[in-house]
Amino acid sequence: MYEIRFFEDKVYALLREGTIKGASHLYAGQEAVAVGAIAAINENDVIASTHRGHGHCGAIGNKHAKTEEARQEHWNKMMAELMGKATGYCKGRGGSMHIADVQKGNLGSTGIVGGNIPVATGAALAEKLKGSGSVVLCFFGDGATNTGAFHEAVNMGSTLLCGLPVVYICENNLYGMSVPFCDKSVDKAGQASRIRDIYARAAAYGIPGESIDGMDVLAVKDTVARAVERARNGEGPTLIEAKTYRWYGHSSSDQRIYRTREEEAEWKARDPLVVLRNKLLDWRIADEAELDAIRDKAERTIEDATQFALNSPYPDVSELMDDVYVPSSPSKIEEARVAELETLAKVH
């Protein structure tokens, strides 16, 4: 979780100075959800992420890293991708909201709210038809639960082939952009829903629904592990609502004027990193020095990843057409590449 936190804090600083371009939706504060959920799956399982997806990508990359070198390479690729560099996971083409690594079971993220839910459901259908035994974790925010894609996909996930091996995880950070998801103290026109508990919607699809403390990584892991076991055993989906909170605004330009500083302080008092640290100390699993060493190592990992990304090259213009078309007709692709490069040459 430390690596995700340091990564997001560094990304925010790089956004403010203009080194990273465009919008970025930071995951700081929600680390327990991604880390706990992904700790509960196997390496042959699959995830589908959201526009606020750095934490999911970070956690699954760490899960697959077998050495410190592989772990560092993972964070190098993540930071390089956000800077649009050729050494990134998607060669700089995906950026913050479309980062993916299919080889590690990360189907990728999307800038479309709720757009990944049908994708995850389709992936679960494919896994069941293949008989692979793999489970799909589908992450999304509270705002996505008000989309048609959510309803249609969860309905299909609960009915196709007697239930698909997918776990739907809603990260309810209380706000859809600047709109409270459910706040009885405001006029009903000023909230996204009149239903406070998203997990209760599971009843409409005939599947289990659970609410968990999204600031407690161990609670997340235990709950997701049960849902994953159900899915793997052919018992279908579960809808899990993790109550959590994002430290930053909706995106890097959001000044958070719709939230009080008192509310933020209340949630930050339950920082998921501190919650876990205190448990490890109370249970005498680790001491202060050991935990400080883990924190310091995580910070160095992200600093090294930042330097790697800064020193990496941007993609060459000659690669503009790479990975755009399926290479079923190489000659036609080459013709299109040449034509595009000729057009660019005329422009410049």
Image: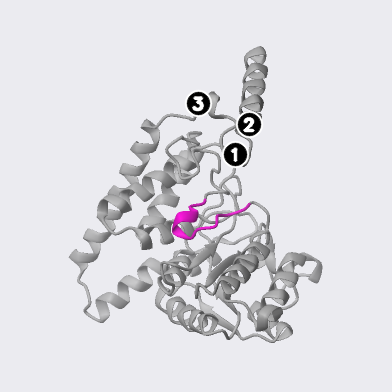
Please give the residue where the numbered disc 3 appears in the rendered image. 316
Instruction: Please check the rendered image and state whether residue 260 is part of the magenta-colored stretch, yes or no.
Output: no
Q: Is residue 278 above or below residue 23?
A: below
Please give the residue where the numbered disc 1 appears in the rendered image. 327
Q: Pointer 1 and pointer 2: residues touching (CB < 8 Å)?
A: yes
Q: Is residue 176 left or right of residue 311?
A: right
The residue under the point 61% across, 61% down is 259
Q: Which residues are magenta?
A: 100-110
Q: Give the image location of residue 15, x and y in percent.
A: 50, 40
CA neighbours of label 2 inside 10 A, class few (<14), some (14 to 19), many (20+): some
3D distance between C-alphas at marks 1 and 2: 7 Å
Q: Is residue 144 above or below residue 305?
A: below
- Name the dominant secondary structure of the magenta segment: loop
Please give the residue where the numbered disc 2 appears in the rendered image. 333
Q: Is residue 146 left or right of residue 238?
A: right
- For the residue pair 247 and 184, the one nearer the viewer reads as 247
